[in-house]
Amino acid sequence: MEAHKLTSITSHSDYLETLNISYRERWKLHCLRKDFGKKALELGDFVPCVNGVPMDEPSGMHCTSMDGSIESGRLQEQFQKAKSRVLFEGFEVGRAKGYVKVFNTIEDLIYTEPTLTETALKQIR
């Protein structure tokens, strides 16, 4: 699978010019990318989170929740749902927390060239 990096709106517009699509479709895609860039960053954009709290992937058959009960199926389902909302690939919790503190919006990340997940690509295509 080809890695897709976050690019500037100008670069994205230049890319759209190369596509054989109508002006209306090009404008729609440009607006999607523009709105995507304005989104405020959250920890869950970088790593799987539930209610803003990072979540490790449950391992094995016996996953224990915070209250000590065993809920492997539910935890795995929560993790997969949280993972499906992640917008950028390759981040660990510590680095992600730093990015959220330093950068305000997705557009601010352009110069770090993060790789977009399929979830992010669906939001701008």
Image (cartoon, rainbow, N blue to C red):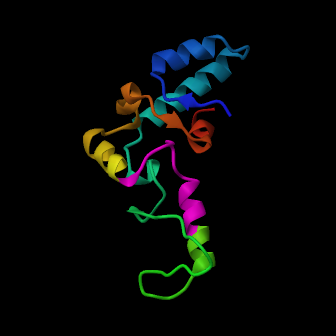
Residue in the picture at 41% in, 41% down: 39
Residue in the picture at 38% in, 32% down: 109
Which residues, given as a range, are shown in magenta?
78-93
Q: Work out which quarter of the rendered image holds the C terminus and state it.
A: top right
Q: Work out which quarter of the rendered image holds the N terminus and state it.
A: top right
Q: Is residue 64 above or below residue 98?
A: below
Residue in the picture at 44% in, 54% down: 44
Q: Nearer the viewer, residue 102 or 17?
A: 102
Q: Nearer the viewer, residue 89 or 39?
A: 89
What is the quadrant of residue 20 in the picture? Answer: top right
Residue 46 is one of the magenta-drawn residues: no
Residue in the picture at 49% in, 29% down: 6
Image position of 38 (left or right of 25)? left
Q: Is residue 94 above or below residue 37?
A: below
- Give the x, y percent position of residue 57: 53, 64
Image label count: 0
- Give the x, y percent position of residue 54: 41, 62
Image position of 103 (left or right of 58)? left
Kindly give the residue lying farthest to the left in the view shown: 102
- Give the x, y percent position of residue 91: 44, 46
Kindly give the residue lying farthest to the right in the view shown: 20
Q: Nearer the viewer, residue 118 or 29?
A: 118
Q: Is residue 56 above or below residue 68?
A: above
What is the quadrant of residue 61 in the picture? Answer: bottom right
What is the quadrant of residue 123 in the picture? Answer: top right
Q: Is residue 61 above or below residue 17?
A: below
